[in-house]
Amino acid sequence: MGTYLLDINTNHSCPINTTMKKLYYLTLALGMTMAFSAKAAVTVNVETPGTLEQTLFDQTVEEYAAIETLTVTGSLNSADLDALTTMSKDYKLVSLDLSNANIENNVFPDVTDGIFNHSKLTNLVVPKTLTSLGAGSFPGTLVTISIPTTNLKEIPEHKFTWCSQLKEIEIPEGVTTIGKECFVFCTALKKVTLPTTLTTLTESAFLGNVGFTAGFILPITDFYVKMTTVPTVGSAAICLGGYWDLCTLHVPVGTVAAYRANVIDSWYGFGMITNIEEYNYNGNAINQLSASNLKVYTSADKTITIEGAANKEPVAVYSLAGTIVRSFKASTDKVTVNVPNAGMYLVKVGAQTVKVAL
């Protein structure tokens, strides 16, 4: 059923077109007529591409003007994406889940300013079927983004430039290239995870505190790289400036030396990162024990390293059969244990226990 307004001259209701509806809802959203509290979450299914706006307009005024969190399924085209941008730019939408939506041709369209730009989106989940993120940048308001697709081959240049609220990013498997200046000015970015498929980091992909970026930090503290072969690193593609000694690079078992050697022109590359440690991406190389600062991680030489144990705190390593392999009291906050064979072990530090794999 369509939307109707009351004609005060005839006392009859009459249908309104989409343009009139937009003006009406915008007036409401600006608080010029009445205010609505935000609706917690709305899910909408779009059966025909191009009808998202109409589908939402046909709901009550409160549901459209006050939606903060929206999940969209079904089939969408560029008109629907424009409508979503408007909902965030002019109304209250900040969280958008498109994971089970199908975008026309499975690509975000190339937009000069970028998809959803000038919107207020803080949380975004892109479609699982997406094959291209399109040209231009994501909105700088993004705090979280999930990319649950393995169909992407590239993160385009400038895609996250000026995403100054973004906290962390996990690049999905399948991506081989990260484009030019992709994460410049991401001044809140703390954690980055790169996939096994990545082969190329282009110019200034992760650039902070150098030259024109002086004063714009790239504060990455944890860099998880799953590539067993060090990727090609373009000019200044890994350049953390003042964060070289504050970041930890977590590399696959057996690759520390290769990543340590990746120093280019003495001022950029993975090898400039001070802290490089092995991470068993197929097991539990680093295990943060709950409610403590303890870390337990493994390396290829059959060594278990324990960090953060208190002085004289009991430490024991057991086989899965329950046999004690090693038992002692910690003398420093970082201790190592050599085990006889690769496999699964239980490490007990004080009252806490964790399982590790070598």
Image: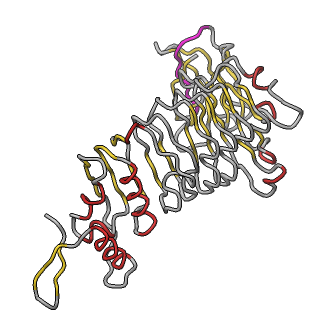
Which residue does the image show at 43% across and 59% down from the upper left? 85
**Corner quadrant of residue 298:** top right
Furthest-bottom residue in this view: 9
The answer to whether 46 is drawn above or below residue 39 in the figure is above
> Which range of residues does the magenta coloring cover?
341-349
Counting from the top left corner in percent of width and height, residue 160 is at 60, 48
The answer to whether 279 is drawn above or below residue 240 in the figure is above
**Corner quadrant of residue 65:** bottom left
Furthest-top residue in this view: 341
Q: Is there any visible trace of residue 189 in the rendered image? A: yes
The answer to whether 217 is drawn above or below residue 246 in the figure is below
Counting from the top left corner in percent of width and height, residue 222 is at 66, 40
Residue 231 magenta: no
Counting from the top left corner in percent of width and height, residue 211 is at 84, 51
Which residue does the image show at 36% across and 84% down from the upper left? 32
Furthest-right residue in this view: 266
In the rendered image, the quadrant that contains the C terminus is: top right
> On the rendered structure, is 8 left or right of 350?
left
Counting from the top left corner in percent of width and height, residue 60 is at 22, 68
The answer to whether 117 is drawn above or below residue 243 in the figure is below
